[in-house]
Image (spheres, rainbow, N blue to C red):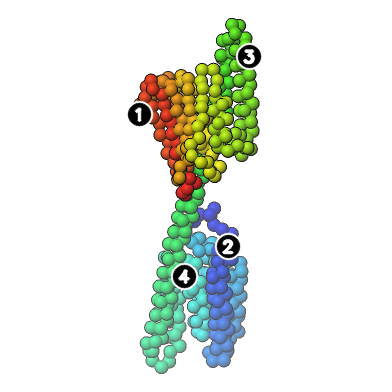
């Protein structure tokens, strides 16, 4: 799998990032220097013919110097990357010098091994395999030229077998590494996509939560103020006392909404729960919702116990949303909040004697009480806590909204 130039890492990055690649390079370079030194010693002690000794030694020196300079100035590419032109030029030059050295010093044949491994490691398969074949043929030809006791089968078979095994193993490892890189790239891409999906889901969930918080606090307060101010405007000339009472109620709601907004900005916790229990906060809510034409009562059943803060906040928001629907849509004169503690759950019922509606019928802003984020927001809050929210209503007979949340379990 080739990468374009824009995707290639700086030279040598793969070697420094992979300690195994660095050690492999050191072993290969050490093996080359040992084989080069032993070949030179054998040439000087047994194979030299006198007339070409100086040229052969010069080629040995040039061969070793070229190999070392190439390793420093034209390093191998990182795994999976295309070899650079400089590296290919160096590999070709060192192979040509080695082939020329074979003519003067046949003992240099075993220096082919580092060249074989270097070519197989860095070149693509379609180039590395022919190079390995050429190097092997040169080794066999050199060994046959030195053979003076007849044809020795091992002279031909041994280099071919060693080259074939080395080529097969290294090609297999190269292809396996390429497959692993593909799998790793897919894994990294999948993790990145999963992280982006989770981030988007988190953003959407947070937006939904904030929408519910705003609906249950600021929007309800503004709606109540609007209704009171409209009532004050209608009675300003005919009943100034009633108008002033509506104005005072609107001012009280504005003050409470301001406290909610400040608490909302600070930690999104309901202001009513800052210094009250859930039962006390619901009782205060019922008293605050009482007004002209609507009476709201509160009843506590069971023995109150400890409740997680998020459960308290959710039930209070559900009560606020339900009473907002009662006030704005139900045309009710009475409503009741009932908080019930059971052994394994806590439930909240909001009942009214309003006009009611058909819960199974799709509703619009003009045909029913479910408008905006009202009932959907309540259902979401209950579902997030592992609970349920049910709505029972009949036209002309009022509505009962019931939320039940477990006191124990993974959702809490």
Q: Residue at x 41, y 69 (%)?
A: 172
Q: Earlier in the sequence, mark 2 or mark 4?
A: 2
Q: Secondary structure at mark 1?
A: loop
How would you rate the neighbour count of disc 3 (Cα within 10 Å): few for under 14, some for 14-19, many for 20 or more?
A: some
Q: Few, some or many C-alpha atoms within 10 Å of disc 1 (few <14, some 14-19, many ≥20)?
A: few
Residue lying farthest bottom?
149
Task: Specify the quadrant that holds the N terminus.
Answer: bottom left
Residue at 48% in and 66% down: 123
Q: Nearer the viewer, residue 207 or 314?
A: 314
How far from the left and from the top, in percent, is residue 237? 60, 6
Task: Give the mark toward the camera: 1 or 4.
Answer: 1
Circles 4 and 3 in contact, beta carbons < 8 Å: no
Q: CA distance from mark 3 to mark 2?
A: 78 Å
Residue that carries the numbered disc 4 in the rendered image: 120
Work out whether 395 lies above or below 16. above
**In front of the other: label 3 or label 1?**
3
> Which residue appears at 45% of the width and 42% of the height?
342
Q: Nearer the viewer, mark 3 or mark 2?
A: 3
Distance of label 2 from label 1 (alpha carbons): 65 Å
> What is the x, y in percent for residue 382?
46, 38
Q: Give the SS element for disc 3.
A: helix
Q: Position of residue 121 (x, y in %)?
A: 48, 69
Residue bearing the label numbered 1: 360
Is 33 positioned to the left or the right of 169 in the image?
right
| Res. 13 mark | 2
**Residue under pointer 3:** 244
């Amino acid at each position: 799998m080739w990468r374009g130039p824009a995707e290639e890492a700086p030279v040598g990055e793969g070697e420094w990032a992979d300690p195994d690649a660095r050690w492999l390079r050191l072993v290969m370079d050490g093996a080359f220097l040992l084989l080069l030194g032993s070949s030179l010693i054998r040439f000087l002690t047994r194979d030299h013919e006198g007339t070409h000794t100086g040229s052969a030694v010069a080629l040995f020196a040039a061969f070793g110097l070229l190999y070392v300079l190439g390793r420093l100035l034209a390093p191998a590419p990182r795994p999976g990357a295309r070899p650079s032109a400089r590296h290919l030029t160096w590999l070709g030059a060192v192979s040509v010098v080695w082939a020329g050295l074979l003519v003067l010093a046949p003992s240099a044949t075993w220096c082919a091994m580092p060249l074989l491994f270097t070519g197989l490691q860095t070149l693509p398969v379609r180039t590395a395999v022919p190079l390995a074949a050429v190097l092997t043929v040169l080794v066999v030809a050199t060994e046959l030229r030195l053979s003076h006791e007849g044809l020795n089968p091992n002279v031909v078979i041994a280099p071919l077998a060693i080259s074939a095994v080395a080529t097969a193993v290294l090609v297999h490892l190269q292809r396996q590494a390429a497959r692993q890189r593909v799998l790793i790239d897919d894994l990294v891409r999948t993790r990145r996509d999963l992280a982006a999906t989770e981030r988007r889901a988190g953003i959407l969930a947070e937006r939904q939560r904030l929408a519910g918080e705003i609906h249950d606090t600021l929007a309800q307060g503004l709606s109540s103020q609007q209704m009171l101010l409209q009532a004050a405007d209608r009675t300003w000339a005919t009943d100034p006392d009633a108008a002033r009472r509506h104005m005072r109620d609107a001012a009280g709601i504005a003050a409470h909404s301001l406290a909610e907004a400040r608490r909302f900005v600070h930690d999104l916790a309901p202001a009513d729960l800052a210094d009250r229990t859930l039962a006390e906060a619901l009782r205060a809510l019922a008293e605050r919702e009482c007004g002209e034409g609507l009476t709201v009562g509160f009843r506590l059943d069971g023995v109150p116990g400890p409740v997680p803060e998020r459960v308290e906040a959710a039930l209070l928001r559900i009560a606020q949303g339900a009473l907002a629907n009662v006030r704005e849509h139900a045309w009710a004169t009475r409503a009741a909040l009932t908080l019930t503690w059971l052994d394994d759950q806590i439930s909240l019922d909001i009942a009214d004697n309003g006009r009611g509606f058909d819960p199974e019928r799709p509703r619009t802003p003009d045909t029913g009480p479910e408008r905006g984020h009202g009932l959907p927001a309540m259902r979401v809050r209950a579902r997030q806590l592992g609970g349920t929210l049910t709505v029972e209503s009949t036209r002309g007979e009022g509505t009962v909204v019931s939320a039940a949340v477990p006191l124990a379990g993974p959702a809490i």
